[in-house]
Each structure stands twice: as C-alpha cells, then as structure tokens.
Image (cartoon, rainbow, N blue to C red):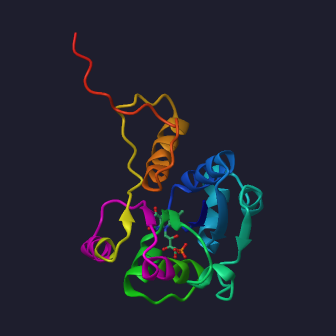
Amino acid sequence: MRLVVALTGASGVAYGMRFLEVCKELGIETELVISKPAALLLKEEIGKRAKDMEKLATRVHAPENLEAPISSGSYNFDGMVIVPCSMGTLGSIASGTARNLITRVADVTLKQNRPLVLVPRETPLNLIHLENMVKLKRAGATILPAAPAFYHKPEDVADLVDFIVGRILEIFGVEHKLYKKWSGLETR
Ligand SMILES: Cc1cc2nc3c(=O)[nH]c(=O)nc-3n(C[C@H](O)[C@H](O)[C@H](O)COP(=O)(O)O)c2cc1C
C-alpha cells in the first residue's frame, strides 16, 4: 500500500507524526508533504523539525512542487490522508483551486475516486467550515475530525493520538492494535 500523507498548519501535528511512524512499522509506503505552517507547528507543539518527520517517510515532496509525480492521476497511490487538516487547506480543496501540491493531490485523489481522509482540528466550527465539509463529503472525501474517544480508557496523550491514527487506518482497511475496540458495556 502507498499513501500520500500531508501535514498542514492545524494544531495536532502529533497525529501526523504518529501516523507516519505507524505506516513505517506496518510497511505502508508514504509520500510526505509538509506545509510551511505545519513545519512551524511541529516545532511549537512537539519540538520536532520537518527533517525528523521526513526520516519516517518513503519519499518527501516540497509543498510548492506542483511537478512532483504525486500530482498526476497516473501516479499509482492508494489514497491520501491530510492529518492534521487546517480549515485553510480544507476550504481550498472544497473550492478546487489546487494551488499547492497538497490541494492538487487532494483534487487528483478525488477525481481518481481514491480515498481522501481529512482530519480537521478546529473548534467551534463556523458555517463556512461546515459547508466546506459537506461539499467534500459529497465529493467522496472522509471527514475524520481529530476528536478522540474516551471509552477505551486512555491513560495519556499518546493513547488519544493512537485512537485517531487507528481510525484513519480503518478507513484503508488496515488492521491494528492501537486502541482497544469497544466491545459493549461491562454489566455485572
Ligand atoms: C499556533 C497556531 C495554531 C493554529 N491552529 C489551527 C487549527 O487548529 N486549525 C486550523 O484550521 N488552523 C489553525 N491555524 C491556522 C493555520 O495555520 C493557517 O490558516 C495556515 O494558513 C494554514 O495553512 P496550510 O493549510 O497551508 O498549512 C493555526 C495557526 C497557528 C499559528
């Protein structure tokens, strides 16, 4: 399996970093694109540099490089994940502008009918955010908010992050043991 993974400048870059780590462990090839605002948040939120992330990816592309192979529908990849996804990037994809590599590949992913998973992190949501999400859902994208559950009894932030990473993998049908799945209420 080969996935395009993009990080944009929303809070929650730890989700993107962990997703790449898990893909590497599972032998999933990754084509990584990090937006400039995401690189700033990497440093701010988890004290990492883009270079630290790039080590985890199979191939790396600059966000302004619209000539990268992944920007073509003829390049073979199984889907795209934008984690975290800023409302700016989400809005650009919804309007089809395709002006950087991330929004272009998202556009291509939709036109080729491949899975596109967007992991937005914003709260509260305004009407523009919600309408853009509806538009993208109608176009075939999966909107997977960075909203971890608590029923698996997370003990730390890593458990919360793993919940979201697990949910993304499930969209691609990938088995994992990142969190304990809900198996009904314990009644005694
Ligand atoms: C510290 C910081 C935190 C931010 N958090 C969010 C966020 O959680 N969600 C969001 O949609 N935008 C957030 N933004 C705004 C985006 O970074 C900004 O809209 C940027 O232009 C997005 O560009 P990109 O989508 O190309 O990465 C944040 C910005 C900063 C500086």
**Position of residue 42 measured from the top left corner of the image (x, y, whole percent):** 64, 58
**Along the horizontal axis of the image, is 180 left or right of 129?**
right
Judge by depth and name the residue closer to the eye, 75 or 81: 75
> How many marks do you count on the picture?
0
Residue at 47% across, 40% down: 160
Relative vertical location of residue 27 with respect to residue 134 in this rendering, above or below:
above
In the displayed image of the protein, which residue is found farthest to the left? 187
**Position of residue 131 measured from the top left corner of the image (x, y, whole percent):** 26, 75
Residue span colored magenta: 107-135
**Along the horizontal axis of the image, is 127 left or right of 92?**
left
Residue at 64% across, 73% down: 36
**Along the horizontal axis of the image, is 105 left or right of 31?**
left
Q: For residue 179: magenta?
A: no
Residue at 52% across, 55% down: 12
Residue at 42% across, 74% down: 90
Specify the quadrant that holds the N terminus.
Answer: bottom right
Q: For residue 123: magenta?
A: yes
**Position of residue 40 measured from the top left corner of the image (x, y, whole percent):** 64, 65
Judge by depth and name the residue closer to the eye, 176 or 178: 176
Relative vertical location of residue 99 with respect to residue 22 in this rendering, above or below:
below
Q: Looking at the rendering, which quadrant does residue 95 occupy? A: bottom left
**Position of residue 115 measured from the top left corner of the image (x, y, whole percent):** 45, 67
Judge by depth and name the residue closer to the eye, 158 or 20: 20
Specify the quadrant that holds the C terminus.
Answer: top left
Q: Looking at the rendering, which quadrant does residue 148 occupy? A: top left
In the displayed image of the protein, which residue is found farthest to the top? 188
